Amino acid sequence: MPDNNRIVVNSTQIKANAQDLLSNYLEQGNEAQRCFSASAVAQAKMLSAVPALTQGLYHEDPDVVIDCANALEKLPGAGARELEEVARFHPEGDARLSALKALWFCAQNLSEQQNKNDSYRKIRYLFSEFALGRPSDESFELSGDWDDWWDLQLYAVTCLLQDIQTDDLQLFSDLLADDPEPELLKLLCQGMAKLAPEQLISLYADKPSNIRRQIVKALALAPSQSAPLVCEFLLQQLLSNDVIVRALSIESLSNFMDNNISHEILMRACDPSAEVRAAAFTAMLRSQYQFSFELLLALINGSDDLTTTFYLRLFAQIGTPINTQQQAELALLGENLETQSLLSLVELLDVELLESIHRESLLLGLLEQLKPDLSSEIMSQILRQVRRFPAHEEHSLPSLKHIIEERSNDREGPLFESSVRLAAIEALVDIDGSRHLKKLVLGELANDEAIAVTVIEPSVDEQTDSPDTTLESQLEARTQSTGEYQALTTVPLSTLAAIEQISVEQNLKIEQQPQVSSQDHIMGLANQLDDSLQDYVDIVQGNFDSADNLDLNRKKKARLPEFDNQILAVRALASGNNEANQLLLIEALLGASPVLHREILTSLTQLCSTKQGRKVASNAIGSAGNAMHHGDVLSKQAAAQLLSYMPRSKAIPLLLFAVNDSNAHVRLACLVALQSHIGKSGMQSYVEGLSSILQRRLVDSETGVRKAAFSLFAKLGIDSLSVEIQEQMLKAAIENDECYVLATSAFEPIALWALMNLTQSLPELEAESEKRAIALIGSLLKYS
């Protein structure tokens, strides 16, 4: 442990030494040290370093100039004159841009402190000059292929827009007439909308479509006193032929919402463009305008499917909860709705409060929509809504079983995609005593009765061993008649018969001459040509190779991974609340394959979010321990995640065992799991063993493991650790980027001790470590 009393006594001296070291590097160090120190003094808010930073603006290295300007952007008291010289005359565009940023910081301080004095006006005038773009008499050619003046002009306009004044109107108007770049165009339109929206509207008719769209979008920022004029103009644009203009008009109108505007936006629900309808819906939600139940119900009558969906989603904004009577009125709509609008209706209703007749009608309506031509996304949504209905299995079970079990005729495997089958299985997980779910999870183990086996007795003729009926004679006869090997088509009636048939076929199989492909034949002829024609041979071979690659690319198809029903059932159980069904996961652990085992562990981990789920998952502690000792890499990671929720006395010994695993992913998973146990009572008994293991992980070969170990030490409380561990952590922080990002908060409790050690060791460090050490000194000076 560090001597805290001595550190307190010398705290002033320690901080002074650290600041002197940074100042020395800033004034006399090499280019890299100056850059690192400039960032560090800004982080430490060292006002005493402002003169050195100002002097650094004249350094010959552009990187030093940029870092000094960036530092001055964060410190008050910077010299405006020096920054202006850099902004006007430096040959590097990035240096000019950094100086402009620092100047704007100075301008903001001046406007707050001295009420926009002459210095502020001078800086603002400079930004107005930069807003005009590259001057005709520019004597410096900025380096690089990109014209840095575009960035300078864009930043200048951005700053002027933050504190816009009436004097800027003419500037913005002139720039807008000069066909600006899209980013600049957006800012100019916003500025004019704030100052003179009527003038911006007057420009609309003569501008191309890209500028018209920006004008419409910018009018959302118009002042309230101009609202009548702006709204009248935007309402006219709702009839525009440009879809984007109509959508942007709705977006801008939402900032001036009243009864008339809300009605007009509601009418956009019938717009043929999906983009306009989406903009109308978003505008209604953002405005939080409250509609009446009767109005929305009237609008639904006679609307098409998409429009009805739009109106149904707005019922969430009627201001008061939907009562039982209103729910019944809405439920009656379900008889005539199509798929998407029916889904929106069911999402809106509390189906448990509906009368049984309405509930049954809606459920049957949903089930009727389950057709093979529907997209997988829509089918999954329907099935998840079916799950909400109490006792839905009375009507839904045949449909669910069909979706889960139906096989495809066109390709091998199930007819429906995994996402659809998963949604169907999820609809079963809350059903008490679901035999179908049990069969899906446990497979053959779900059968309570003995499996009936039909024994086929061989006939008398099959028992005779005459030469004419043996397998050998049958195969010989078939081979002799055709002159080539022919396999038997007879299906064996027993395992022994199948083994015998395979053995005989292998013994009597006649070697066939492989057929030569046309490509091989052509290349064989080409290779026989004279050496002088080798270029021609190479061209032929290259054409064949290109054709092979093209054929391979044609066969490539992006498909989502498919999973069997047992895996999907295990995943589905993680979303259920039925304890009896959840216990099927524990039963399925017996004899599970490695893939199924880790899926079960993952589902049990998800169940741990509830008290009931943790009770079920605690039964798998033995299986998790077995996985830690004998499982594959993925099973160990799944077990580590589960152990993060298990009782500390059982989980920590297993995690400490596996944290030394040869696989880095397993080590990282164990360290992450250990973090969930840190901070709980009773951890003191594990600190010593944990510390010795984490010390080894601080020098792990993998970066993620080192970072996790560093984070664990920090959570244990760095001020309670031994000096040896503190020194090792400090070394890890300045040698590894992944540990450095956690160092400032980790060393805050012992900031003075860390500053003292960093200051003493800094001259001896290598370049990369020196960079992190300087930055860490700057960060820790804030807490010392």
Image (tube, rainbow, N blue to C red):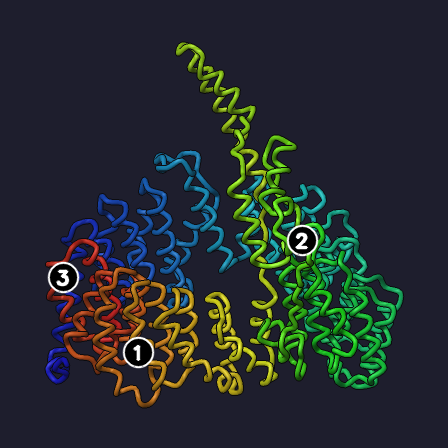
Mark 2 or 1: in front is 1
Q: Are marks 3 and 1 in contact (CB under 8 Å)?
A: no
- On the image, numbered disc 3 is attached to which residue? 762
Amino acid carrying label 1: it is Lys
**Is disc 1 placed on a helix, strand or loop?**
helix
Amino acid carrying label 3: it is Leu
Q: Are marks 2 and 3 in contact (CB under 8 Å)?
A: no
- On the image, numbered disc 1 is attached to which residue? 715
Question: Would residue 689 be seen by someone viewing this image from the given angle?
Answer: yes
**Is disc 3 placed on a helix, strand or loop?**
helix
Q: Give the label on residue 472, or none.
A: none
- The quadrant in which residue 512 appears is top right
Amino acid carrying label 2: it is Val
- On the image, numbered disc 2 is attached to which residue? 216
Mark 2 or 3: in front is 3
Residue 376's x, y, as percent?
A: 68, 60
Question: As rendered, which of 336 and 664 lies closer to the eye?
Answer: 664
Vertical placement of residue 759 versus 513, above or below: below
Vertical placement of residue 634 versus 681, above or below: above
